[in-house]
Image: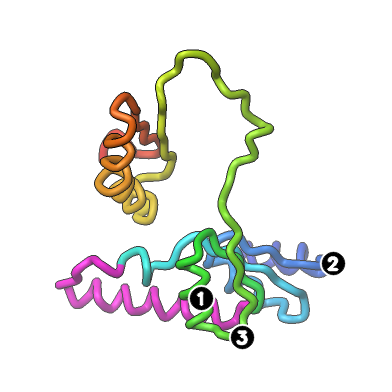
Amino acid sequence: PDYLKQFDILSKDCDLIHGEQLVTGLVAKLRPNVPSFLNVHNLIELDRRQEKITNPYEAMIRWRQIQSETQTLRHSQNVGAVSQELVSHIQKLHPSALAQWIPFGIDPHFYTPRLGGREFEFGMVGNMKWRPSLSAAINVITKIWPRIRAQRPEARLLIAGWDARAQ
């Protein structure tokens, strides 16, 4: 495929391959002599563990997704993850990997806060067609938001992103 040719050309002279998202870990295996770092945002095995599957086809797909995640992680020596839960799970799957928590964040120096009499706003942005984002939004709405509202009744919740209104 085209992306493999591009990767081959670009990776010949690189010092480090940084994979952003789990699927990129498979591409890093193409250059085993180049150090790589894989940044993991989510794992199907954790994100969808509470979903009940009744369809055999869906069960097979889920099993294959988890196998793919596991294989990719076992080939990745240096791994970053956006939560301690992910780090713990990665360490169970690949104990010799150097897995570390790298919190996701936004640099506040790039944003000017609005001051003066503004109400407390809490928000989340994500593609709601992507199951981890939708799952996170549901978690915010059902578990986190009620606790915030109990302490700050004037607070507003904003959920934004692709397909947010449809969900």
Q: Nearer the viewer, residue 92 or 18?
A: 92
Q: Are marks 3 and 1 in contact (CB under 8 Å)?
A: no
| Label located before the other in sequence (3 or 2) | 2
Question: Which of the labelled discs sits on residue 13, or is there none?
Answer: 2
Image coordinates of residue 19 in percent, x first then y, are 63, 64
Question: Which of the labelled discs sits on residue 96, or is there none?
Answer: 3
Q: Nearer the viewer, mark 2 or mark 1?
A: 1
Q: Does 120 appear in magenta?
A: no
- Compared with 164, 57 (above or below) is below
Q: Can residue 127 be seen from the camera position used here? A: yes
For image coordinates 56% across by 51% down, the residue present is: 104
Q: Nearer the viewer, residue 118 or 124?
A: 118
Type of the residue with mark 2: Asp
Residue 132 falls in image quadrant: bottom left
State the SS at label 1.
Answer: helix
Q: Does 72 appear in magenta?
A: yes
- From the image, give the main secondary structure of the stretch colored magenta: helix
Q: Residue tagged by mark 1?
A: 90
Type of the residue with mark 3: Ser
For image coordinates 41% across by 26% down, the residue present is: 120
Q: CA distance from mark 3 to mark 2?
A: 27 Å
Q: Nearer the viewer, residue 158 or 22?
A: 158
For image coordinates 56% across by 85% down, the residue present is: 95
| Label located before the other in sequence (3 or 1) | 1
- For the C terminus, the image quarter is top left
- Find the magenta span and give its range: 49-76
